Image: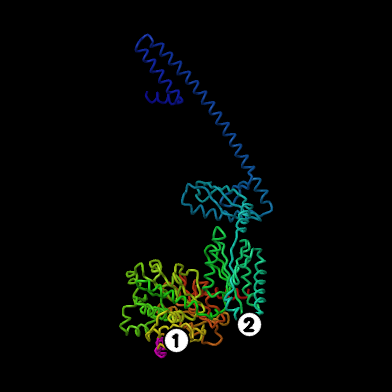
Amino acid sequence: MQNNARNFFDKFLSRTKIYLVIILVLLIAICIQDTRWIMPSILLYILIVLYAMFANNKRRNELSESLQDLTITVDSAAKTSLINSPFPLVILETTGKVIWRSSKFVSEFANIDIQNYLNDLLYDIKEEIKNKKDQNDKSVIINQLEIGNRIYKIYGRFVNSKKSNDNQYTIILYFIDETESIKLQKEYTDSKSCVEIIMIDNYEENMQLIDSEEKPQITAEIDKCIYDWTDETKGILIKSDRDRYIYIFEQRYLEQLKTDRFSILDKIKEIKNKADVQFTLSIAVSNEGKTDKEKYKSAQTAMDVILGRGGDQAVIRENEIYKFFGGRAQEVEKRTKVKARVVAHALEKLIKDASKVMIMGHSNPDIDAMGSAMGIYRLVKELGKNAYIITSNETNNLQSFKESLLKDPEYEDILITKEVAEENIDEDTLLVVVDTHKTNYVEDPELLNKIGKIVVIDHHRRSTDYIENAALTFQEVYASSAAELVTEILQYVTIKINLKTIEAESLYAGIMMDTKNFTFKTGVRTFEAAAYLRKCGVDIIRVKKWFQSDLASFNKIAEIVKKAEIVNDTIAIASYNRKTKDASLICAKAADELLTISNITASFVLGNVGEKICISGRSIGDINVQVILEKLGGGGHITLAGAQVEGMTMEEARQELIIRINEYFTEIEN
């Protein structure tokens, strides 16, 4: 009974229900006051209910008709919009069957074999559907697709078309033509400015060697070459100094510069003069920054990198990535020692202001790093400060040297581990980094962030991950070794330095090692530094013993040399696949040994050092091994370089090295 009444009232609209209840309550109240109104009230209420039913049904019918008309209208509009879509539209199944095409789709792709594009799209769509994490998301977006000479962004939705097959879908795709939008975006990007700085290397020194009457002619020829070259990219060139130019051009010409590979570098070298002095350029280009001022600062940073690599090359800094061009010539030794004197005085002041000095070289240090550290140690001690050398106890490269060093009680506590160093630093500690400038190659990278004042002394070509927050940097790529630079510093400080014999010998050994017994990369200043150390009492025989190999190591080197292969006619490549602590040292010695073979102009030896493959590169100067190994994340010099690669097997690293060697020769030919 109660359910029947509820079902009866459910037929009415909510507002009508309220009215009927109110009327019923009023009629009941009247009947309670006067019983004579019972029958009339019942009849009246029945009439009211019947009228309400009639009116309710009429309203329902009118609403239903309105909704039906609206549905028909919307369906008609939707179908019309679908058929006459202003952009191409297609409905297809994942099997490749096309169900329907819009008229715009047919006309747009009338002369194009669109089916091949659709098949490629379906493959991508099915992969996207398969990888969707949100199963309720039925949308798909295919990024830009070039069809014919137009570029489209493709949107779509999919539905499961057959319940019995979960992999069967019907897809509707919308092709939005973005060709003009992309052209506009490209034009906007191309019209942005790039800032280029051009510097003439060693301008003052070169001009001193040229006759006065010839100087204007040489200057005019250099200017003409630079102006002619920049004219090709239609920018604005300003000569800001005798040896410095600022060039601003549109970014659309950046690819042209890359293709040209900065041919101006070679054109400048062709300028002839009676003194037979060769001029070279350093060029830095950047498009990083919102304003031209920010781009200029970015180009200046790139120029610092170029000058730290010896000049005679160009670099483009784009999206925080450096791309180098040129830089295959030998560095030219500078003829003045002004910078060495300035650095010596600045370093002396920094040491005096420090509470203590920590000294470290690169990871797995060699005798050049250790000898340089010993030289700085003596300078610090002569200035009355405490100094400590951070080194790993696992290093086998310096075993003979350490045995000689620890015979003197003074040195028992100066060799410390990085853990001990981190525990004993304070806000006034000075950190001196020798024989490297790379943040990820020092003995303890954490110290770079924990110590406020840092000094860098290095002779390698500057790489992009150099230590940026150094208070003082003495990086001269003309130098044979870091030991040579430290020896120069010791000669120019204001106090007299009394080098102990083993300290002088370690510096001498560092020069000997990096010059291969004074054969490679030696200049006048190299021999001057060696002569100074010789006066300090160097025992050459003892130094020679530090370089001797035991019979087991010699046999390993002989085995590597025996298995070497020749590529590109004159380049030797060998591998050492044993995981030993001295793998890097063995590889370096093997690379040196390969260069003693006739007709070998460069050698590369790969070694297994655990999680990484180390590569030692050596050259007699005809081939720039630094440029080759830089492509693998390494660095060094024209005649001596190294690299470490991760995530590769020995054979994969070897093949990658061969690819980089081939790239090097291709770039030279072009």
Secondary structure, mark 1, is helix
User: Could you say which disc has been placed on residue 276 in the image?
Assistant: 2
Please identify the quarter of the rendering in which residue 406 is found: bottom left
Q: Position of residue 462 (x, y in %)?
A: 50, 72
Circle 1 residue: 532
Q: Position of residue 620 (x, y in %)?
A: 54, 83
Position of residue 449 in the picture relative to residue 224 (left or right): left
Quadrant assignment for the N terminus? top left
Kindly identify the residue that appears in the image at 50 percent across and 46 percent down.
163
Q: Of 271 and 177, which appears nearest the observer?
A: 271
Quadrant assignment for the C terminus? bottom right
Please identify the quarter of the rendering in which residue 117 is found: bottom right
What amino acid is labelled 2 in the image?
A: Asp
Q: Position of residue 370 (x, y in %)?
A: 40, 79
Q: Is residue 562 visible?
A: no
Q: Is residue 102 visible?
A: yes
* Category of crowding for the residue at label 1, using alpha-carbon neighbours closer than 10 angstroms: few (below 14), some (14–19), many (at least 20): some
Q: Position of residue 517 (x, y in %)?
A: 47, 87
Q: Which residues are magenta?
A: 537-550
